[in-house]
């Protein structure tokens, strides 16, 4: 019985070590933001120099960066509401209630769905305000493989760099 407990403990530790090692942190020094994901994503060329994109066949993360002066005057009045509005403006459906991002003081995310023909893709949409740098981040995490857990962990991992 003792050997069984030890074996179980070793398997548990081994799995946790593998999970910890399989996470990758991506950061942008230019825009002072980073996130961690278990997905093996590569950067891709975007149409704008203020959009940072990461993707693979199953997953995509896009971060669009705005200066505070580029958004409407009421953008920050209710960031929870703004986050839901951004998701709706992206033509996403089933937009859920905004949830605070734990790692940033001014950030929220929502879970929504991108309906493309007969395919429904879960999407997490986040909005973060960086008071120090006066920057706004609008983030989308597309879960093409329907892995909501990986998508949620990714959006919740976002934080600001000094």
Image (cartoon, rainbow, N blue to C red):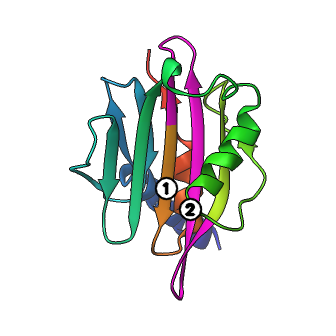
Q: Residue at x 34, y 34 (%)?
A: 27
Q: Residue at x 65, y 56 (%)?
A: 88
> Where is residue 65 shown, x and y percent of the image?
42, 32
Please identify the quarter of the rendering in which residue 99 is found.
Answer: top right
Q: Is residue 117 visible?
A: yes
Res 9 visible:
no
In the picture as drawn, the residue positioned furthest to the bottom comes out as: 118
- Which residue does the image show at 55% across and 57% down from the upper left? 90
Q: Quadrant of the C terminus?
A: top left
Q: Is residue 146 above or below residue 26?
A: below
For the residues bearing labels 2 and 1, Cβ distance under 8 angstroms: yes
- Label drawn at residue 123: 2
Q: Is residue 77 left or right of residue 147?
A: right
Above or below — where is 114 with respect to 69?
below
Other residues around mark 2 within 10 Å, as few (<14) / some (14–19) / many (≥20): many
Residue that carries the numbered disc 1 in the rendered image: 141
Residue lying at 39% horizontally and 59% vertically, measured from the top left: 60
- Report the residue that reaches farthest toward the left: 45
Q: Secondary structure at mark 1?
A: strand
- The answer to if 124 sits in the magenta stretch is yes
Between the C-alphas of marks 2 and 1, the distance is 6 Å
Classified by dominant secondary structure, the portion drawn in magenta counts as strand
Quadrant of the rendering where the N terminus is positioned: bottom right
Circle 1 packing at 10 Å, graded few (<14), some (14-19), many (20+), is many
Which mark is first along the chain, 1 or 2? 2
> Could you say which quadrant of the image residue 101 lies in?
top right
Residue 98: x and y in percent read 74, 47
Span of residues in magenta: 113-137
Q: Position of residue 7 (x, y in %)?
A: 52, 68
Residue 56 spot, x, y in % from top left: 30, 65
Secondary structure at badge 2 equals strand
Nearest the camera: 69 or 52? 69
């Amino acid at each position: 019985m003792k050997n069984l407990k030890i074996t179980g403990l070793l398997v548990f530790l081994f799995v946790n070590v593998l999970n910890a090692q399989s996470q990758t942190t991506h950061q942008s020094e230019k825009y002072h933001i980073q996130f961690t994901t278990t997905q093996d994503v590569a950067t891709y060329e975007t149409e704008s120099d203020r959009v940072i994109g990461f993707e693979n066949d199953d997953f995509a993360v896009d971060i669009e960066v705005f200066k505070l002066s580029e958004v409407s005057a009421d953008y920050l009045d209710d960031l929870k509401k703004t986050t839901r509005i951004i998701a709706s403006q992206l033509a996403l459906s089933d937009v859920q209630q905004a949830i605070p991002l734990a790692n940033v003081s001014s950030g929220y995310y929502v879970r929504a769905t991108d309906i493309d023909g007969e395919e429904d893709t879960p999407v997490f949409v986040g909005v973060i305000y960086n008071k120090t740098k006066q920057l706004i981040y609008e983030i989308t995490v597309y879960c093409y493989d329907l892995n909501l857990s990986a998508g949620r962990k990714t959006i919740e991992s976002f934080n600001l760099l000094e």
